[in-house]
Amino acid sequence: MKRFIPYLLAGMLFGFTLVKSEAASWYRIMEMFHFQSFHMYGIMMSAIVTGMIGVQVMKRFTGRASLEGTPMEIPKKESGRYKFVIGGMIFGLGWGIIGLCPGPIFTLVGMGSVGALFALLGALHGTWLFGALRKHLPE
């Protein structure tokens, strides 16, 4: 059980950051979709830059063990396929409809939001449905 403490602490820090930066705010998300504010775009751009730096750091240490002791590897993605574009469009459509992406859903559920709980249940159902239908979908 102790091995999960770093993940719990990282998740709590992530949730705290989402709340304090207002990235878990439905109003901020709607401002972004209506092109009324740069706030969320700035958060996303800083996350992209941080992620790019993090991936480069991880690539330099490939072969070192993760917290579980398994070697860290970043597989190359296939190119020339549209499934990432289609998946991104579906993700964005869902995000625009409910006004939340997965990180803020968990954060808002932790804060006691009943509406976010229903969004989480819908996201979990969609994940289960994809797993059940995956073998019938084009790869």
Image (cartoon, rainbow, N blue to C red):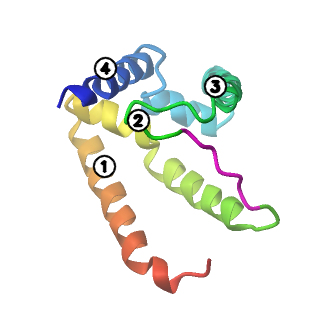
Whichever of callouts 4 and 2 sits on the residue coming sooner in the sequence is 4
Between 5 and 73, the residue placed more toward the observer is 73
Magenta-drawn segment:
72-78
Q: Position of residue 128 (x, y in %)?
A: 33, 67
Whichever of callouts 2 and 3 sits on the residue coming sooner in the sequence is 3
Q: Which residue is mark 4?
A: 9
Q: Amino acid at mark 3?
A: Gly
Q: Is 106 included in the stretch rendered in magenta?
A: no
Q: Could you say which disc has been placed on residue 69 in the image?
A: 2
Q: Position of residue 41 (x, y in %)?
A: 67, 27
Q: Amino acid at mark 1?
A: Leu
**Residue 37 picture quarter:** top right
Q: Position of residue 19 (x, y in %)?
A: 39, 19
**Viewer-nearest of labels 1 and 3?**
3
Q: Residues within 10 Å of mark 3 (few under 14, many from 20)?
A: few
Q: Check the image and report above or below for 74 versus 138.
A: above
Most extreme residue toward the top, as rendered? 20
Q: Which residue is mark 1?
A: 120
Between 91 and 47, the residue placed more toward the observer is 47
| SS class, disc 1 | helix
Q: Check the image and report above or below for 52 versus 137.
A: above
Q: Residue at x 51, y 48 (%)?
A: 95
Q: Which residue is mark 3?
A: 54
